[in-house]
Image (cartoon, rainbow, N blue to C red):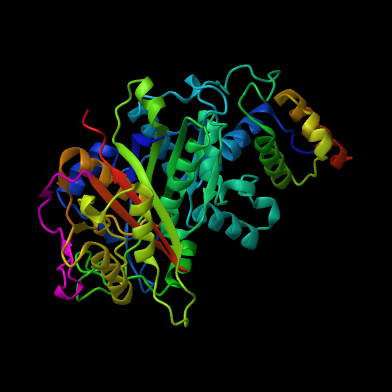
Amino acid sequence: MSAKFTIDDLKRILREGAGTDETVDLDGDIAGSDFEELGYESLALLETGSRIEREYGISLDEDALADARTPAALVDLVNSHLAARAV
Amino acid sequence: MSVVVTGLGVAAPTGLGVDAYWANTLAGVGALDRISRFDPSGYPARLAGEIRDFVDEDHLPGRLLPQTDRMTRLALVAADWAFADAELTPSDLPDYDIGVITASHSGGFEFGQNELRALWSKGGQYVSAYQSFAWFYAVNSGQISIRNGLRGPSSVVVSDQAGGLDAVAQARRQIRNGTSVVLAGAVDASICPWGWVAQLTSGRLSEHDDPRRAYLPFDEDAAGHVPGEGGALLVLEDGAHAAARGARVYGEIAGHASTMDPAPGRDRAPTLQKAIQRALADAGAVADEIGVVFADAAAVPELDRAEAEAITKVFGPRGVPVTAPKTGTGRLYSGAAPLDLAAALLSLREGLIPPTVNTRPSERYELDLVTGEPRRAHPRAALVVARGHGGFNSAVVLRAPDPS
C-alpha cells in the first residue's frame, strides 16, 4: 500500500490553500467537525481537493468530495483512493 | 434629499488611515520611489507610489489571505476604517439597507499574474480555485459585502480614473432611491510585472528616475505620470439618516456629471468642461461658490492643456485655487478620485488646501496652482475632477456641512 493520508496532511493543505479561521483551533480535535463550522466553504474544499489531487496523484470524484463533510470523512475518501491505486 | 459623507477610510502611499494621510499630504510628503515590489530595471518606467507599511496579517483574517489580491486586502481594511470613522456598525442596520459600490481599473492583477504563471508553467491543477473571482473587477465590492454583511444595492463601475467618482455618483443614486447607506470609492493596486506592462501600453508613464522630477502636471517638464497604489472608501449616507443618529458629517455630495470625449480624429473639442459645468448645475452651484479644485493632473502636456482650458473657461484665468496632491502618491487609477474626495472634504473641514508637490507651474496654463505650503482658505465647496483613459470625464461638487 502507498503512503497513507493523515489528518495532519489535511491540516497542512488546508492551511496552505485556504488559510485558517482565527476562531478555530485546527490543532484541536477537529476530525468530526463539519467543514463549515471550521470556516471552510465549498470553494475552500474545491481548492483543498485540487491540492490533494496534484500532490498525491489521484483524482477525486466531485460528488464524493462534496459529500465528505468532515476532515475524517475526507481523510477516509483520500485513503480509499490511495488504496485502490495501490491494488 | 441630501447625500452626505460620514466616514473616510484611506490607504495611500503617503499614509495608512485618514490622519496619517492628511498630515503627510499637508506636509507635502512625496512617496514616489523606485519600485520595490519587483525588479523594475528591465522596464522603461521604474518609479511608483507604493504602500510600504501595510502588513496584511495585522489587518485581515487568515481565511481571507489565500483568496485576495493586494488591492482587495487594502480595500477590505479601508472599508473597516471607513465604518469605524463613521461610527457605524453595518449589522445594526436593517437588512438590504446598506450596500457597497466600488470602481476598479484593472481587477486583481497580481493574483491573476501568479495563477496564470502557475497555469502556464505547471498546469491547470495548480491554479487556485480562488482565481474564479479574485481577479475580477467586482471582487472588492463582493469581498467587502461578504465581510460586512452589506446586502443592499452593490456593484462595480469600470471607467479608469473617472470611475472613482462615477462609483460615488452611483452610490448617491442608490441612496436617493431609498438605501440609507452605501460604502463607495475605490482601491486599486497593480504594481506587478503584468500590471506594469499593461499600464505601459498607455504611453503615459513617466520614464524619469528622479522621484522629484518624474510626475509634474502643469509643469513645462511634464512627461507622463507615475502610477501608485491605494485609494479611499467613503461612507455615503442619507442626510436625514446621518442626522438621526447624530453622525459627524464631512460634507455633501452635492453634484456630479460625467461625459465622454469624442472619438480620436473627430473635429470636436474634449468634454471635460461640460462635465464640470453639469456637475455645478447638478449641485445648483455657481462657479464662484467653488473654493478649490482638485485636478485630474495627467502630466501629459496635451491633457494638462485640455484640463487647464476647461478649468479656466469655467472659473476664469487663475480664478480658483487648484491642487493635485496626487503628485505625492502617484496616480492611483480608480483609487485616485476617492482619495481626492477625502482630501477635499478635509480641506473644507480644516480650511487648508494641501499643496501640489514637485511641480513648478507653467505660466501657460493660467492656473492658480497651490504649491509649497498648504494654503489657508475657507472653501465652502470643492470640485474634484477625474479623467479615465479612453475619454471618460467625471466631476463631483462637494459642499461643506451646513454650520448650523
Question: Left or right: A79 with respect to B130?
Answer: right
- Residue at (45% x, 33% y) in the render: B60
- Residue at (78% x, 39% y) in the render: A2
Does B358 appear in magenta?
yes
Query: Quick check: can you spot residue B130?
Result: yes
Magenta span covers which residues? B356-380
**Magenta region, mostly helix, strand or loop?**
loop
In which image quadrant can residue B243 be found? top left
Question: Left or right: B276 with respect to B23?
Answer: right
User: Height in image: B210 above or below B104?
Assistant: below
Does B374 appear in magenta?
yes
- Residue B56 point in image, percent of width and height: 41, 39
- Residue B187 point in image, percent of width and height: 42, 48
Q: Decide which of A9, B184 is in the foreground and name it.
A: B184
Query: Quick check: can you spot residue B229?
Result: no
User: Height in image: B309 above or below B115?
Assistant: below
Number of marks in the rendered image: 0
Q: Quadrant of the C terminus of chain B?
A: top left
